[in-house]
Amino acid sequence: MKICRVSNSYPHENNPGSGLTPYYLSKCIYHPTLYITKAIEVEKKKVPKHVVLKEISYRDEATPQALRDELHSDEKSHIGRRILRLLKVIKTFRSVTFFLKSIPALAAFRPEIVACHQNLTVFHGVFAKYCLGSKFILHIHNNSEIEVIRNLWLLRWLVQRADLIFCLSEIMSKELKKIIPSIAGKIRHTSTGMNPRLFKNVGLKRKDQLIAIGSFKWTKGYKYLLDAVARVFRRYPEYSLVIVGDGNERESITRQIQNLEISNKVELKGIVSRQDVMKLLNESRLFVMSSIHEGLAKVLLEALSCGTPAVITTGCYADNLVQGRGLLVETRNSQALAKAIIKLIDDKEFWQRCSMEASNVRKEYNWENVAQRVYHDYSELLHNGR
């Protein structure tokens, strides 16, 4: 089996959590693999021996906030439809540039399977399917990508060309089936994974500390988290919040922290090593994820594996995972978020039960097990054509 995996991200020192799903699938499926990704001039995670990394230089600027809002909105105004047409041009140009520069490496490798991660890589899959005879597999990582598919007809048409489509949660699978009923038989449900050798409960003393981890972008819902913890701090002044990550929303996050007068209670850690993430999770009382859009986030699995109960939103699409291991609240609701955090701080017996149950995710969600399930579906597609 020859696999070409396409993703615009690869784990690197400035963002060690970026692109972990395609990286670990490449690492744990032991077949010749071409990994096509965006070129970044920083030190990257070690490339496995059976993987060839092909880096493509192309311009990939962030989509302006107004365009993002329209793209993910359920209701479109007249102006919104114009914005979406412009967005189609912008996003298509970016993805086509990446694709065109990838063609020589893709054609020379002649993969049996092209596994595309993120919507912007679907051109690779369609080209390989019709020009190279490859199987086109699409991996969808979060609900935000499904919203884009819902709103862009060209993307819907391209997605229908896929031979298999992997979604990270049952809820995401159901949403995609509603948008494109004809592809229901192609959809598979598979989770993300985590490294159980690194992320585990090492018995550190828990501090009066909350922790959030993720890029500083609007989909993480940090403004709701900060409003929530400001309420929590009024009741529990001894508590603090650590946020690990960075990104283009850092300025607005810093400004909100100042406006809420909680600067002495919130620490922005920036990017830290995976080892440091494990230590921080083990030291913290609660992990909080306030996302508006998410897939099955790897960091949630990592937090639970460290025995750290979680408070998450419905936008995380991990309802079943958090049952018995924390609390679930509706998205964009600071009051509900604060109430859930306070519940887990107040009820020490409930916290203990959640912590003990949380550690059990290490058994099912390690990367080797996840990769073997994906490999089984890859093999069935090649051998049986389905």
Image: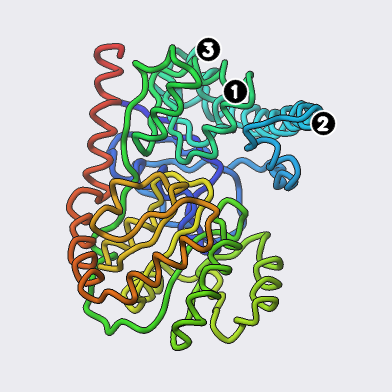
Give the residue displayed 71% in from the left and 44% down from the top: 63
Residue 141, position as x, y percentages in the image: 45, 40
Q: Which mark is residue 79?
A: 2
Q: Earlier in the sequence, mark 2 or mark 1?
A: 2
Query: Regarding mark 1 in the picture, which secondary structure is present there?
Result: helix
Query: Regarding mark 2 in the picture, which secondary structure is present there?
Result: helix
Query: Regarding mark 3 in the picture, which secondary structure is present there?
Result: helix
Q: Which mark is residue 131?
A: 3
Between the C-alphas of marks 3 and 2, the distance is 38 Å
Residue 339, position as x, y percentages in the image: 43, 66
Hey, which quadrant is residue 42 in on the image? bottom right
Judged by depth in the image, the label closer to the viewer, 2 or 1, is: 2
How many numbered marks are there? 3
- Given the image, on which type of amino acid does mark 3 rest? Cys
Give the residue displayed 48% in from the left and 71% down from the top: 272
Q: Which mark is residue 41?
A: none
Looking at the image, which is closer to me, 174 or 362? 174
- Given the image, on which type of amino acid does mark 2 rest? Ile
Looking at the image, which is closer to me, 111 or 273? 273
- Given the image, on which type of amino acid does mark 1 rest? Leu
In the rendered structure, the answer to whether residue 26 lies left or right of residue 144 reads left
Between the C-alphas of marks 1 and 3, the distance is 19 Å
Hey, which quadrant is residue 112 in on the image? top left
Between the C-alphas of marks 2 and 1, the distance is 21 Å
Crowding at dot 3, Cα within 10 Å, few <14 / some 14-19 / many 20+, comes out as few
Q: Earlier in the sequence, mark 3 or mark 2?
A: 2
Hey, which quadrant is residue 52 in on the image? top left
Quadrant holding the C terminus: top left
- Residue bearing mark 1: 155
Tell me, yes or no, whether the two marked residues, 1 and 3, touch with CB atoms within 8 Å.
Answer: no
Looking at the image, which is closer to me, 207 or 11? 207
